[in-house]
Image (cartoon, rainbow, N blue to C red):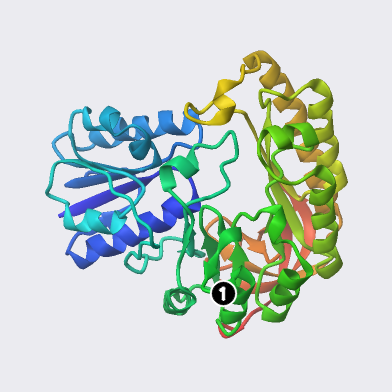
Amino acid sequence: MKACILTLGCKVNEAESDSLLAGLEALGYETACTPCVADLYIVNTCAVTAEAERKSRQALSRLQKFNPRAPVIVCGCAAQRDSAAFASREGVTLVTGTMRKDKILQMLGEKGVFLETERAFCELPAPKRTHTRQNIRIQDGCNRFCSYCIIPYLRGRSRSRSIQSVRAEARASGAREIVLTGIDITSYSDGGQDLGDLLLALRDLPARVRLGSLEEGIVTREFLEKMKAAGNVCEHFHLSAQSGSDSVLAAMNRRYTRAQYLEACALIRSYFPDAAITTDIIVGFPTEREEDFLRSLSLVEEAGFARVHAFPYSRRTGTNAAKLADLPASLKKERMGRMLTAAAAAQERWLARFEKRTFTALFEEDGGYTSNYIRVYAPEAKEGGMYEVRLEKREKDGYHVALLRPVPGDM
């Protein structure tokens, strides 16, 4: 018997799917994570944007072309948001949502809709290694309720995994790099211990640790000192901005100002001068005027971002922002073009700082990354290998590098 899982969306979904792959293999299934002929399909869906939901629906059709008689299980955010739409699809036998995904493995032969809530973090089987880096779930849910975001309504309130459980999975993974993932890892809490304490608890790992997306409020001297003391945490901060305008930030319910965000960036660089600060920016939020957009454009340069993930505002029914009049699609498209140009220029400025510098890089199938998230290329590097490298020549979105020496497995 063969099972195939197709995953849409975030790293949390990826980590959950990897756990389901491991659980299926324990049940005797051969598994795959790319579309193929199989006896069972699972689609782990996303609903962060309307486009993500559309792709989630398309995924069903893609898989069913390989074996239209195989049962299909649908889970994840889009299924939580509109379970009936998926349950009515031909071939779909079971629809579950975002929570209690541990029960999917017990319900493979069942039919219907299963939506359940959870108050504590849901443990899943130790994930199968499907990439060089290993995503490790440390938290789920969100209490922030940004006005544009549907995810807190679908994932539930914030809940965290114990430090002991995170340590055990990280040590067993065998990965040279682990990525701590969650819906809002800034809110991580295990009793009286926070995300900084978790980093200290992982300092003895024979691997480097990369953080998932962070919120501005996590950036304090205490947190940065814990991160520095840990010694194995990558100098990469994905610090979500969303806008450079105070009025738009207030309308988004983001709870910080432009000045506070820039202060956080400056504090990061006082501890980690070579740190990559990457971000998300929403273009065309309903209250965004031209002057607000110009504030976002100038933030890209002023913050010195290494990379910007910009995307147009997507109206999500059920959120507070959905009550506002949307901006014309043509205006959002025009602003997106200007934002992408600014983002590309910022990336070029950041990369130019590091020519001929030496770093440590972990290589994947098609290149690798330094600790501070510089994309590097070396045809002779082995997948899964970690090397000391020198950045020699600009190439694509990073550098062609010279391999100086391999880094021992015990780091």
Q: Estimate the x, y position of residue 314 in percent, counting from the top left.
A: 56, 27
Q: Is residue 70 above or below residue 339?
A: below
Residue beneath label 1, please? 192
In what quadrant of the picture does the N terminus appear?
A: bottom left
Point out the image quarter for the C terminus: bottom right
- Relative to residue 76, is residue 365 depicted above or below? below
- Residue 120 location, quadrant: bottom left
Q: Is residue 156 left or right of residue 357?
A: left
Q: Secondary structure at mark 1?
A: loop
Asked whether residue 147 appears in the rendered view, the answer is yes
Q: Position of residue 355 (x, y in %)?
A: 84, 59
Looking at the rendered structure, the number of numbered marks drawn on it comes to 1
User: Which residue type carries mark 1?
Assistant: Gly
Residue 134 pos. (x, y %): 48, 65
Crowd band around label 1 with a 10 angstrom C-alpha radius: few (<14), some (14–19), many (20+): few
Could one spot residue 397 in this view of the protein? no
- Identity of the residue drawn at 68% across and 25% down: 284
In the picture shown, does residue 300 fall above or below 326? Answer: below
Q: Position of residue 200 (x, y in %)?
A: 62, 79
The residue that appears at 36% across and 47% down in the rendered structure is 98
Q: Is residue 24 left or right of residue 15?
A: left
The quadrant where residue 362 appears = bottom right
Answer above or below: position of 301 versus 50: below
The residue located at (85%, 53%) in the rendering is: 352
Q: Residue at x 49, y 44 (%)?
A: 152
